[in-house]
């Protein structure tokens, strides 16, 4: 393996074993850091490297080494009275368990074949060539509804053509998960995140029932605004981000660093003391943050002069601060982070972008635009819960019913979530399902944690709330995987995780009094 882990299988002395493990895990993390930097170059500069395959091979051989798994299991028992070492080994074993499935040669081969087909799929509409990436960007922002529909229907055709290959991937993932004793792969992945997926489905269905008034309100508002009778799936993202057109020179991307500096300094931190590179580049998505290590952080935002660009920037800065203040004392607890905890920090930091004082300080906005931003924020909260729940419900049903028509599953789930029948996507055209399985519900858990923290500290926004931020660092960010995300929620909020406060937020969006200018 070349990283030093092979020595662990032969050591019997406790102190020698700990010392050897410490060296090996530091070597492994250097490999992860190299991989993260390569991904940064790939996403930001379209720079491809053959080294990534070499790294993935090394990781696969390490993470699937049965002798090493046996060694860790044995030492987990030996060190069971030491809570830190117990947690370190538990987290590493959990990662090995995930990798043993996700890096299985058959899974990788099918996944890569499917990715290749989706990436290379192109078609023409009205003489112009499109691929699934440009379909997504048009679904998000193109005001031409007929074009959005045509592109959407073409993406569904691509999905139908690849349904059997996606089914093959799901079958293999399910079979491997069942070998571990799980009903299906989705439940396997959720168990690693400490999520009871069936309970989540029950709670989300109850939440949607309780916020039906908000759903009706926003459906009526959107149909009235755009002159429609029904909202289809190709409309949801567009209406969410374009209910009001908030753009112009005041939102010049050239000002991003300046605005992010104010957001950070309001929390008692000087941005020049954060080791982050911030770039506005022409990328095919809103933005991303890559935390190579606490002292090497990358933040990239799509270069566009819109309010949404600053929203993306503030969100990604939340990820950057999380990566900077998270403890690096135990590399595996930093690297194998909880996506739920990470997203909740970003969502909490994102509240700054709609803070009225922050907006007035950084942009010359009229009262009308301020009201529009407030309204778009409320709509975004509601729509993101609906859309992410829909995606998670569809994906879970795919793994539960792998032999059913995937289009029928998507159609049926649409009525469950949105309350009526509509034109829906084909699951086999969704690249995110292929590359990041069982992830969409994490966004909703993150929003719920955001609202728990806001309720506990009696704040609407993190802006200028330095004491809250410092407590967040000490109790939630810094410990990272030393504690599970549920334990950290209880540490910071004083109560167990609940969707109750998110439900309250969504319920409060249903009155005309809350609406801004139209």
Image: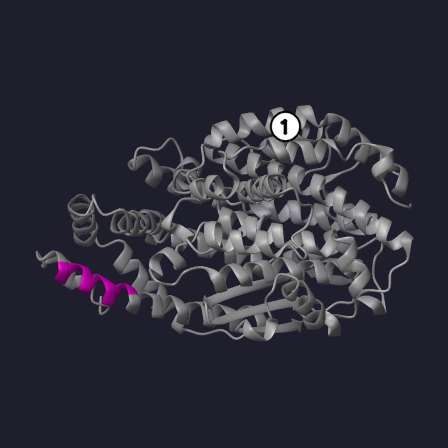
Would residue 354 be found to the left or right of residue 175 on screen?
A: right
Residue name at image x 31 percent, y 58 percent: 60
The residue nearer to you, when weighing 382 against 130, is 382
**Residue 267 among those drawn in magenta:** no
Q: In which quarter of the image is the C terminus?
A: top right
Residue 377 at x, y percent in the picture = 75, 47
Residue name at image x 16 percent, y 51 percent: 71
The answer to whether residue 229 is seen in the rendering is no
In the image, residue 441 above or below residue 311: above
The residue nearer to you, when weighing 240 against 350, is 350
Q: Which colour scheme is used?
A: one colour
Q: Quadrant of the N terminus?
A: bottom left
The residue nearer to you, when weighing 286 against 163, is 286
Circle 1 residue: 207
Q: Determine crowd level at label 1: few under 14, some 14-19, many 20+ residues with C-alpha closer than 10 A.
A: some
**Residue 20 among those drawn in magenta:** yes
Residue name at image x 74 percent, y 53 percent: 355
Span colored in magenta = 15-25
The residue nearer to you, when weighing 237 against 10, is 10
Would residue 331 be found to the left or right of residue 232 on screen?
A: left
Q: What element carries label 1?
A: helix
Residue 194 at x, y percent in the picture = 41, 38
Secondary structure mostly seen in magenta is helix
| Number of marks present in the image shown | 1
The answer to whether residue 1 is seen in the rendering is yes
Residue 482 at x, y percent in the picture = 36, 50
Residue 144 at x, y percent in the picture = 84, 52
* Quarter of image, res 15: bottom left
In the image, residue 103 above or below residue 497: below
Would residue 455 be found to the left or right of residue 23 on screen?
A: right
* Residue projecting furthest to the front: 467
């Amino acid at each position: 393996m070349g990283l030093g882990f092979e020595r662990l299988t032969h050591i019997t002395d406790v102190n020698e074993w700990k010392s050897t493990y410490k060296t090996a895990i530091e070597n492994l993390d250097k490999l992860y850091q190299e991989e993260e930097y390569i991904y940064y170059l790939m996403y930001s500069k379209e720079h491809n490297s053959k080294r990534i395959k070499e790294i993935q091979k090394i990781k696969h051989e390490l993470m699937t080494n049965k002798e090493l798994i046996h060694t860790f299991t044995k030492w987990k028992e030996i060190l069971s009275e030491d809570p830190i070492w117990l947690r370190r080994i538990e987290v590493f074993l959990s990662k090995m368990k995930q990798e043993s499935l996700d890096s299985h040669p058959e899974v990788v081969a099918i996944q890569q074949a499917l990715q290749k087909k989706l990436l290379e799929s192109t078609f023409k509409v009205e003489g112009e060539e499109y691929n699934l990436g440009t379909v997504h960007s048009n679904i998000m922002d193109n005001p031409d509804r007929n074009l959005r529909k045509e592109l959407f229907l073409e993406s569904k055709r691509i999905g139908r053509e690849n349904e059997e290959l996606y089914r093959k991937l799901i079958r293999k993932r399910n079979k491997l998960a069942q070998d571990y004793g799980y009903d299906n792969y989705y439940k396997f992945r959720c168990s690693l995140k400490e999520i009871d997926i069936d309970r989540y489905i029950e709670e989300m269905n109850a939440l949607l029932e309780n916020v039906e008034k908000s759903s009706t309100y926003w459906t009526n508002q959107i149909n009235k605004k755009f002159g429609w009778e029904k909202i289809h799936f190709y409309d949801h993202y567009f209406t969410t981000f374009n209910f009001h057109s908030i753009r112009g020179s005041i939102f010049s991307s050239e000002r991003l660093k300046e605005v992010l500096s104010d957001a950070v300094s309001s929390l008692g931190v000087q941005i020049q003391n954060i080791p982050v590179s911030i770039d506005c580049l022409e990328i095919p998505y809103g933005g991303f943050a890559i935390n190579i290590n606490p002292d090497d952080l990358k933040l990239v935002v799509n270069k566009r002069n819109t309010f949404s660009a600053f929203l993306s920037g503030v969100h990604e800065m939340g990820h950057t601060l999380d990566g900077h203040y998270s403890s690096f004392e135990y590399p595996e607890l930093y690297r194998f982070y909880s996506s739920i905890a990470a997203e909740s920090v970003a969502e909490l930091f994102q509240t700054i972008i709609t803070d009225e004082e922050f907006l007035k300080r950084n942009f010359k906005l009229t009262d009308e635009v301020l009201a529009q931003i407030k309204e778009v924020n409320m709509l975004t909260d509601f729509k993101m819960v609906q859309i992410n729940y829909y995606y998670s419900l569809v994906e879970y049903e795919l793994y539960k019913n792998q032999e059913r028509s995937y289009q029928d599953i998507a159609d049926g789930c649409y009525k469950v979530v949105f309350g009526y029948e509509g034109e829906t996507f084909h699951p086999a055209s969704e690249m995110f399902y292929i590359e990041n399985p069982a992830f969409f519900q994490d966004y909703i858990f993150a929003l719920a944690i955001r609202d728990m923290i806001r309720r506990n500290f009696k704040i609407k926004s993190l802006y200028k709330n330095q004491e809250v931020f410092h407590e967040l660092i000490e109790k939630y960010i810094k410990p990272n995987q030393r504690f599970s995300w549920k334990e950290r929620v209880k540490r910071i909020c004083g109560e167990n995780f609940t969707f109750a406060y998110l439900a309250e937020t969504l319920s409060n969006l249903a009155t005309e009094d809350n609406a801004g200018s139209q």
